[in-house]
Image (cartoon, grey):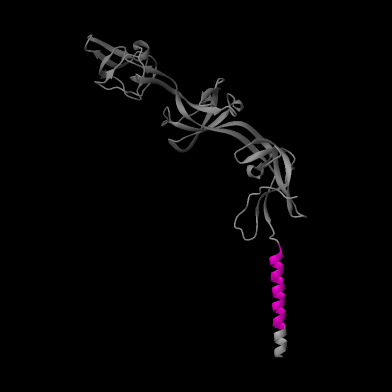
Amino acid sequence: MRNKKIFIVGLILIFSIVFIARSCGRPEETHYAFTRARKGTVVELISAVGNVLPTASVEVFSSIKGRVTAVYVANGDDVDTGDNLFKTYNPVSGVEDIVTSPAHGTAANLSIGKGSRVETPPSVAGTANIAPALLIADVSILTVKLAINEVDVNKIRKGEKATVAFDAVNDKTFAGEVDRVDSVGTNTQGVITYNVYINLSDPPDELKPAMTANVDIEVAKRADVLTLPNASLKPYKGGKAVLVLNKRTGKTRYLPVDIGIAGSLRTEITGGLKEGREVVTGALSPGRRGLLQMGRGGG
């Protein structure tokens, strides 16, 4: 009886050792994550950061050198053409002058107060670096000015829709529209950019000129087209491809595809793939805790 028990225990040990040996000798099986090509809408956006501009602004200077003896406006005041802005007096010549508004608009950037010294404008005095006493700005329509790189500017057309967010206005976006695109670029240290101007449909009351704006311009839109997540597309022989799995061999291979416009999350697929086709997005081997993005396919 005792010998029989020893024999059974021995068999169990032998089978256990054989099982463990076979398990250790097997290559780890790779598990894949998949997505399917599906119909949807893709919107191509060009994103840029710019600043708010008034429709127009006029710099205002004193016509004589001297001291400011009175100021009749404050920042934010509405003024009409001919309204008094400030008064200056030159004690040497005894001349007194009242400066009036050259345009209808809003007083802004007031840099003078009673007792401030003022100079004549650069065009008269022939001197530079003289700051204006104030600006008269037309803020009835506020525009966002963007600098767009030479690669993207040809995609932008007058009338295209834009979504605008402001650092100074939390958790809100506003509608805009491309008003105009410069045809001559600006070279800044070898970087060529073109100015693009966005008109705001309903600007918030707290918006002020020079505030920072974050803009997304909708340059193309495709509805009811075949799409895939951007991350599933791989560079391949100068184009794009996806990884597909051969379930018989367990290996992946590249499948070239043609693409259309690319959105922020998904890309339009125009050829090489049918709706519902399963493509590989990542791999997970036993013992690992996360998906590994696929870098290359097997045979």
Q: Nearer the viewer, residue 96 or 170?
A: 96
The image quadrant of residue 88 is: top left
Identity of the residue drawn at 63% across and 49% down: 293
Q: Main secondary structure of the magenta part?
A: helix
Identity of the residue drawn at 73% across and 50% down: 298
State yes or no: residue 46 in magenta: no
Q: Nearer the viewer, residue 32 or 53?
A: 32
Whole-percent x, y for residue 143 in the image: 48, 25
Count up the numbered dots.
Answer: 0
Would residue 84 appear left or right of 213 to someone viewing this image? left
Whole-percent x, y for residue 247 in the image: 75, 54
Whole-percent x, y for residue 186 in the image: 52, 23
State yes or no: residue 13 in magenta: yes
Q: Nearer the viewer, residue 245 or 82?
A: 245
Identity of the residue drawn at 33% across and 19% down: 133
Whole-percent x, y for residue 201 in the image: 50, 28
Q: The N terminus appears in which quarter of the rendering?
A: bottom right
Compared with 123, 256 (above or below) is below
Query: Does residue 200 appear in this view?
Result: no
Q: Which residues are magenta?
A: 8-26
Compared with 190, 82 (above or below) is above
Q: Nearer the viewer, residue 253 or 107?
A: 253
Compared with 189, 170 (above or below) is below
Query: Does residue 270 appear in this view?
Result: yes
Would residue 148 appear left or right of 55 to someone viewing this image? right
The image quadrant of residue 102 is: top left
- Which residue lies most toward the bottom here? 1
